[in-house]
Amino acid sequence: MILVERSALSSHISSLLAAGQGVFSADDAQKALGVSRGAFLDAAERLQRRGHLVRPRRGFYVIVPPQYATIGAPPPESYIDALMRHEKRPYYVGLLAAAAAHGASHQAVMEFQVITNKLLPDIEAGRTRIVFSYRKDMAAVSAGIEDRKTQSGYMKLSSPELTALDLMRYPQSGAGLDNIATVLSELAEQLQPKKLAALSGVFEKAVVQRLGHLLGRVGHPQIAEPIFVALSVRGPLPWVELDPKQAGDPDLSPPISERDERWRVIVRRPPEIDE
């Protein structure tokens, strides 16, 4: 009986692939096969062990075509939109994953980074880790989210402007200040100053100050000029650390090397750009 059910599920996922569909829900498959939930789960578990399926979330399955068998799963961009619809959460692919999609990635991106409005656990799918960052006000940055075509449809992707701001808001996801500065130097030519200024208004002052300072440091002060104008109407600027981690322990912090009077940014160790 189990072999029959596994064979039926194998045939079902083959028909889904033939129709261009790479994901399915447990509810839909159970209904299509006319089997009990327990029978479906047994058959699905066996196909997972054989490397034909992965289950990123309970009730949601991704089919592993033969060409992705060696890495254990298809690339996340092929199913992230369907996964987040299953989760019933707004989202966008952001940070270093978005920078790479925009062609600004000096090194291989080790994580597929997604921003959504709930703290979600990371996902291991084959050799890929999907990592989630939290943003409460997803609607506030909607102007910076675009649809990017993928092999299987579309995914939500942060624009170059939103990507730049997010890298400063979530520095722990940017692989260090040196890497963030390097990515910004590659992303800068795609930044539209007016769009950047418009989006900057929904970010914390400190995020905008750090971004403005870094854009000047990597040789693009003209791009930062509109965000400085937008920032100036928000009131006096406090002094902020370029890298807050460096000021965590007064006894261990590096000494201050410079103060950017315009952006009111304190620099202890200037970032090094990887050419």
Image (cartoon, grey):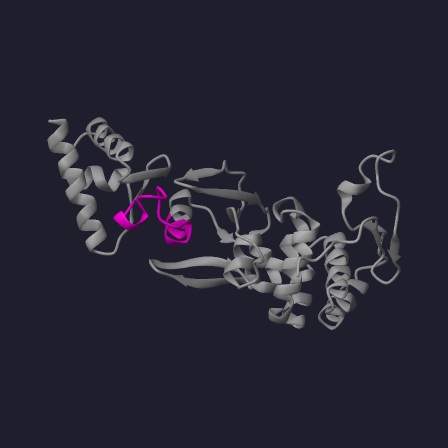
In the rendered image, the quadrant that contains the C terminus is bottom right
- Residue in view at x 72 percent, y 59 percent: 211
Left or right of residue 179, residue 67 in this image: left
Residue shown at the point (41%, 49%) measured from the top left: 76
Q: Which residues are magenta?
A: 64-82
Judge whether residue 72 is colored magenta: yes
Q: Nearer the viewer, residue 202 or 124?
A: 124
Percent from the top left, x then y, of residue 173? 61, 46
Residue plotted at (21% across, 50% down):
16
Would residue 238 be found to the left or right of residue 17 on screen?
right
Pick whichever, 28 or 54, lies toward us: 54
Q: Visible in this render: residue 220?
A: yes
**Image coords of residue 188 (percent x, y):** 65, 67
Q: Is residue 176 left or right of residue 130?
A: right
Q: Residue at x 74, y 60 (%)?
A: 214
Location of residue 237 by image quarter? bottom right
Q: Using the rendered view, name the quadrant where residue 258 is placed.
A: bottom right
Question: Residue 198's spot in the image, x, y percent?
Answer: 66, 66
The reply to whether the magenta stretch includes residue 8 is no
Residue 218, placed above or below residue 63:
below
Taking 272 as reference, is 6 above or below it? above
Question: Is 221 above or below relative to 151?
Answer: below
Q: Residue 11's spot in the image, x, y percent? A: 15, 43
Q: Is residue 94 visible?
A: no
